[in-house]
Image: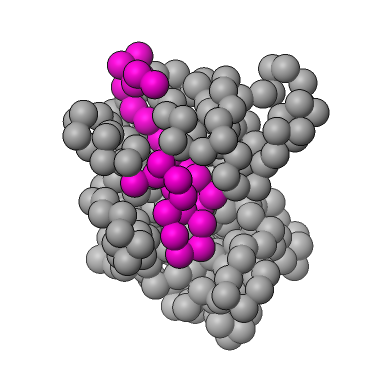
Amino acid sequence: MNFDRYDAVLLDLDGTIYHEEHALPGAVELLRRLQREGRKFACLTNSTSSPQRIAERLRRMGVDLPDEAIYTAGAAAVDFVLSADFRSGQDRLPRVYSLATEGVHELLEGKVEWVRSAEQPCDGVLVGTSTSAFATEDRQRVALEILRRNRDVKLVGICADRVYPSPRGIEFGSGAMTMMMAYAANVKPMFTGKPEAIFFHELCGRLNVKPERCLLIGDNLESDIAGGKRVGMKTILTLTGVARREDVERLPVEQRPDGVIEDLTAM
Ligand SMILES: [Mg+2]
């Protein structure tokens, strides 16, 4: 496939580029080709960690990518926290209480004022998964108190995924954790990962491209295909992950991807 008609190629990671600890067919070749042809591209994941940490994991699989070529839901949450919207347009550091990962903490360190107790003013509570380093039970309790005290505090879930797989089995995802906080505090959360438009818009801002000039390739009909289509991207579904061809055929025509491939060797 010739990518000349696109300004950027966006590739999902889990189920598209790799599965568990190995690269999927055609993935390494496609990434090398995009680099060789000097094209703008990015690899996307709803991981609550930082691009740096994902890049290290990919290197162990033999996929060598610069940190800038990776965009995680964690990075999207960081971009939102550092935007004027998070601090309601006020000219000061964002004030954050985090139940998120060390990766997100590293990206925000020095750029935010960390809230330490429910008595301090706070712009937003950031929520990762139940196993995130900063999501201890004590910290969950403080976050709940912050949300109950001030209705203006934003509840920001890194992504809305209900669960995620780990070597131990299925874990509570960022979405499940966020909804627990939202239910307890009786507030409405927002999310920054796929398929939210904010994820794709922040990414396009970083790449300096328009969404309608992007090609997105992913394995998930909801988080990748529906999310990309909603912001005007061209989309290709790869069958190496969660979706099957029958799932596509069940969808109304306007919700289907622009193309379906067996794996990335078709690119
Ligand atoms: Mg995927």
Give the residues in magenta.
1-28
On the image, the x and y values in percent for residue 59 come to 29, 61
Q: Quadrant of the N terminus?
A: top left
Q: Residue at x 60, y 39 (%)?
A: 239
Residue placed furthest toward the right: 250
Quadrant position of residue 49:
bottom left
Q: Residue at x 22, y 37 (%)?
A: 35
In the rendered structure, does residue 5 fall within the stretch colored magenta?
A: yes
In the rendered structure, does residue 77 fall within the stretch colored magenta?
A: no
Residue placed furthest toward the top: 5
Q: Residue at x 75, y 35 (%)?
A: 247
Quadrant position of residue 6:
top left
Quadrant position of residue 225:
top right
On the image, the x and y values in percent for residue 134 come to 48, 77
In the rendered view, how is the structure colored? one colour
Report whether residue 39 is seen: yes
- Say above or below: 54 vs 38: below
Between 186 and 140, which is closer to the camera in this rendering? 140
Between 210 and 237, which is closer to the camera in this rendering? 237
Residue placed furthest toward the bottom: 138
- Magenta segment, principal secondary structure? loop
Is residue 109 toward the left or the right of residue 229 in the image?
A: left
Between 225 and 125, which is closer to the camera in this rendering? 225
On the image, the x and y values in percent for residue 72 come to 42, 52
Is residue 26 toward the left or the right of residue 110 in the image?
A: right
Is residue 119 toward the left or the right of residue 239 in the image?
A: left
Report whether residue 44 is seen: no
On the image, the x and y values in percent for residue 150 come to 61, 62
